């Protein structure tokens, strides 16, 4: 930073050299920031007066301020060798070290100068700027304040103090000390009331710390200055998006976008274009966004900000492989690109390439130390692969006098991003006082899950069910083998085989009915909020009966935060043999219902916060040729996440759908679930 006070000193020297050259013109060039003209001027003087100290000092300043810092350092080093006691040359030498970004040497040299003259404004301010560049902001504030004690109100010192506060606040923000950062920025505003840079930093801090209303209000303060309205609107649009108000975000961004013809700042025009296209994407207006992106790419091919927009569009459209291609192009242009590294991490995660996702996120942190989004991405990914223990305890009863209590424990133990061990144990006791039946069962299984390909995962478990009932004790082998396949984007297919014991009530458990199931689940999502889920089971049993079960659901996603959807369900069941005195087995069964579901998912819930889910459904069921019967179903869950590693929730359900046992049936269940991550991180990443 040029210090005008030095020129006052130089002006005093002109009287000494007035006989040889009038250098006032050159001083004016330096004073007014015309460094190229100053360089030419003093270069000409030095041709005639090569030993003129003042001309050489001014020439060194001119070329240093033009960016030739190394050459300036050499000039001042030469002057120091001739005039070792000249304090003004020492000050210029110290400043040249700053221009050359040699901050450690500048720090040491300024410390010598301050010992030599503790009241030197130039030395105190130069030292403060050096400490600021070394990110030693607390000490930098001390010395900039000392410089202001020497020259109160000096504009150069006040400007330095402003940027020291901004740097210090950013440092605290990176350390996630949001309160400390906010305090510093507000102090800065007392010095520079209404300062745009400080207000923008404060608004950004509020966005990062999740204080979206405060961020929006800060942007509104920025917009009070008409010259800053567009940049404020861009910020408000982002705050609206983070609050889940996508339509409002688009309206605000549209207003900002309409101001582009009046803008002259190219960076602001670009920022406004980016925000508007992002708002279109947030609102799933993909065709409009694509038209604008294609037009920009044609005008500005291979520019990172446009490639990032196209990659974002493809992320939202689930074209993850196309996104990876764009992110790779971004990284070829700029290895340290934040959008390129973290965007690629998200895309790789979506297509099941978890090792690559980890690597890209870690690359982000090598360039942006402790960056919150990258750190949170790794934390979330770690949660997926951290061993956990989950226990459920439930109590159920129905209007057929059946009662049951069960406890189930599951453990998943990943040893890599591809492989994990599975273990499960459950205990269930069921009774019926009317029929005087009771039974208990113990189930234990072991298995594994292995990602064969990024889009295909194998899962297999095998175990035993040991039962003790009124008239029989037995042990049966059980198994569950499946493939989870993602054949195309927005599609998931599960196919598998599962054998199990019919254990709904004590009488069925006593009969040792083994159910062998071939099953398939298919889910199709779309980019326009519509979804379709279908499930099919073919079951053959050791009592010579067989069942076909088809369930299909067409639903529409109404909201994303919280997730709200509604739709239609249809269920169709047939049994080969009808044994109504033993279990519900109609020749045909049809049921249709409308439902609504609202959920705040536990996976996105922050620690020390609640999560929930509620489903309500009603419809009609038809048993064989009988008349229709009304049905209802209510399911709910309420939980609390204590930490990143532990959560607890209650759940309950009530239903009168006949498919569970018989017509006229009402079923109730309440339960408690606890989940605990066994470690802080995956064992293979410790």
Image (spheres, rainbow, N blue to C red):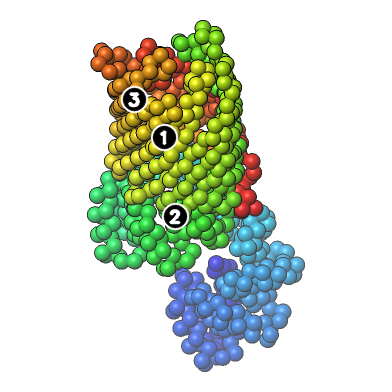
Task: Tell me the quadrant of the picture where the N terminus can be found.
Answer: bottom right
Q: Position of residue 60 (x, y in %)?
A: 56, 80
Q: CA distance from mark 2 to mark 3?
A: 37 Å
Q: Nearer the viewer, residue 558 or 685?
A: 685
- Residue at 61 percent across and 47 percent down: it is 681
Q: Is residue 254 visible?
A: no
Disc 3: which residue? 575
Disc 1: which residue? 517
CA neighbours of label 2 inside 10 A, class few (<14), some (14 to 19), many (20+): few
- Residue at 25 percent across and 13 percent down: it is 627
Q: Earlier in the sequence, mark 3 or mark 1?
A: 1
Q: Position of residue 678 (x, y in %)?
A: 64, 41
In the image, farthest residue toward the right = 115
Q: Earlier in the sequence, mark 2 or mark 1?
A: 2
- Residue at 50 percent across and 86 percent down: it is 43
CA neighbours of label 1 inside 10 A, class few (<14), some (14 to 19), many (20+): many
Q: CA distance from mark 3 to mark 1?
A: 14 Å
Q: Nearer the viewer, residue 386 or 611?
A: 386
Q: Earlier in the sequence, mark 2 or mark 3?
A: 2
Q: Secondary structure at mark 2?
A: strand
- Residue at 31 percent across and 59 percent down: it is 264
Q: Position of residue 479 (x, y in %)?
A: 50, 38
Q: Secondary structure at mark 3?
A: strand
Looking at the image, residue 544 sits to the left or right of residue 284; the answer is right
Q: Is residue 617 above or below residue 191?
A: above
Disc 2: which residue? 453
Q: Quadrant of residue 570?
A: top left
Q: Quadrant of residue 388?
A: top right
């Amino acid at each position: 930073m040029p210090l005008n006070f030095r020129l006052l000193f130089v002006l005093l020297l002109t009287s000494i050299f007035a006989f040889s050259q009038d250098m006032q013109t050159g001083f004016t060039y330096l004073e007014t920031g015309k460094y190229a003209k100053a360089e030419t001027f003093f270069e000409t003087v030095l041709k005639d007066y090569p030993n003129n100290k003042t001309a050489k000092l001014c020439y060194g300043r001119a070329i240093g301020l033009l960016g030739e810092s190394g050459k300036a350092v050499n000039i001042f080093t030469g002057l120091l060798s001739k005039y070792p006691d000249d304090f003004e040359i020492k000050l210029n030498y110290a400043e040249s070290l700053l221009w050359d970004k040699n901050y450690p040497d500048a720090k040491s040299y300024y410390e010598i100068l301050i010992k030599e003259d503790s009241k030197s404004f130039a030395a105190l301010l130069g030292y403060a700027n050096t400490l600021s560049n070394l990110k030693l902001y607390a000490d930098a504030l001390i010395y900039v304040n000392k410089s202001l004690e020497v020259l109160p109100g000096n504009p150069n010192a006040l400007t330095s103090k402003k940027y020291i506060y901004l740097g210090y606040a950013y440092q605290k923000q990176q350390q996630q000390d949001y309160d400390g950062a906010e305090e510093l920025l507000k102090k800065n505003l007392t010095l520079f009331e209404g300062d745009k840079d400080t207000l923008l930093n404060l608004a950004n801090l509020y966005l990062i710390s999740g204080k979206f209303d405060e961020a929006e209000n800060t942007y509104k303060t920025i917009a009070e200055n008409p010259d800053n309205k567009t940049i404020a609107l861009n910020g408000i649009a982002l705050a609206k998006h983070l609050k889940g108000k996508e339509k409002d975000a688009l309206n605000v961004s549209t207003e900002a976008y309409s101001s582009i013809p009046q803008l002259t700042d190219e960076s602001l025009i670009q920022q406004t274009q980016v925000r508007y296209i992002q708002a279109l994407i947030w609102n799933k207006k993909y065709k409009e966004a694509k038209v604008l992106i294609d037009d920009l790419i044609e005008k500005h091919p291979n520019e990172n900000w446009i490639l990032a927009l196209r990659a974002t569009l493809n992320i939202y459209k689930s074209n993850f492989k196309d996104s990876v291609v764009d992110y790779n192009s971004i990284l070829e242009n700029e290895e340290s690109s934040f959008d390129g590294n973290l965007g690629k991490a998200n895309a790789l995660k979506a297509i099941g390439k978890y090792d690559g996702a980890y690597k890209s996120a870690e690359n982000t942190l090598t360039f942006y130390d402790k960056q919150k989004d990258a750190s949170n991405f790794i934390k979330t990914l770690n949660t997926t692969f951290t061993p956990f223990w989950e226990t459920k305890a439930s109590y159920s009863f129905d209007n057929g006098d059946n009662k049951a209590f069960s406890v189930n424990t599951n453990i998943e133990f990943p040893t890599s991003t591809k492989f994990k061990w599975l273990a499960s144990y459950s205990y269930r006791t069921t009774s019926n006082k009317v029929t005087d039946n009771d039974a208990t069962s113990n189930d234990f299984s072991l298995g594994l899950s292995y990602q064969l390909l990024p889009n295909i995962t194998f899962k297999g478990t095998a175990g035993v069910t040991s039962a003790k009932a009124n008239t029989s004790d037995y042990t049966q082998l059980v198994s569950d083998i499946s493939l989870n396949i993602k054949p195309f984007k927005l599609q998931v297919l599960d196919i598998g085989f599962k054998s199990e014991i019919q254990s709904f009530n004590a009488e069925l458990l006593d009969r040792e009915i083994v159910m062998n199931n071939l099953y398939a689940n298919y889910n199709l999502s779309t980019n326009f909020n519509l979804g379709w889920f279908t499930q099919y089971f073919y079951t053959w049993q050791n009592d010579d009966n067989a069942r076909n079960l088809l369930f299909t659901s067409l639903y529409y996603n109404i909201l994303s935060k919280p997730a709200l959807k509604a739709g239609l369900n249809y269920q169709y069941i047939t049994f080969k043999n009808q044994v109504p005195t033993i279990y519900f087995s109609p020749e045909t069964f049809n049921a249709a219902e409308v439902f609504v579901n609202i959920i705040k998912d536990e996976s996105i819930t922050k620690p020390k916060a609640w999560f929930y889910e509620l489903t309500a459904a009603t419809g009609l069921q038809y048993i064989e040729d009988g008349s229709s019967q009304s049905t209802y179903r209510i399911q709910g869950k309420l939980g609390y996440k204590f930490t990143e590693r532990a959560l607890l929730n209650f759940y309950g359900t009530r239903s009168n759908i006949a498919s569970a046992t018989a017509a006229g049936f009402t079923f109730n269940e309440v339960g408690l679930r606890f989940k605990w991550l066994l470690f802080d991180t995956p064992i293979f990443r410790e």
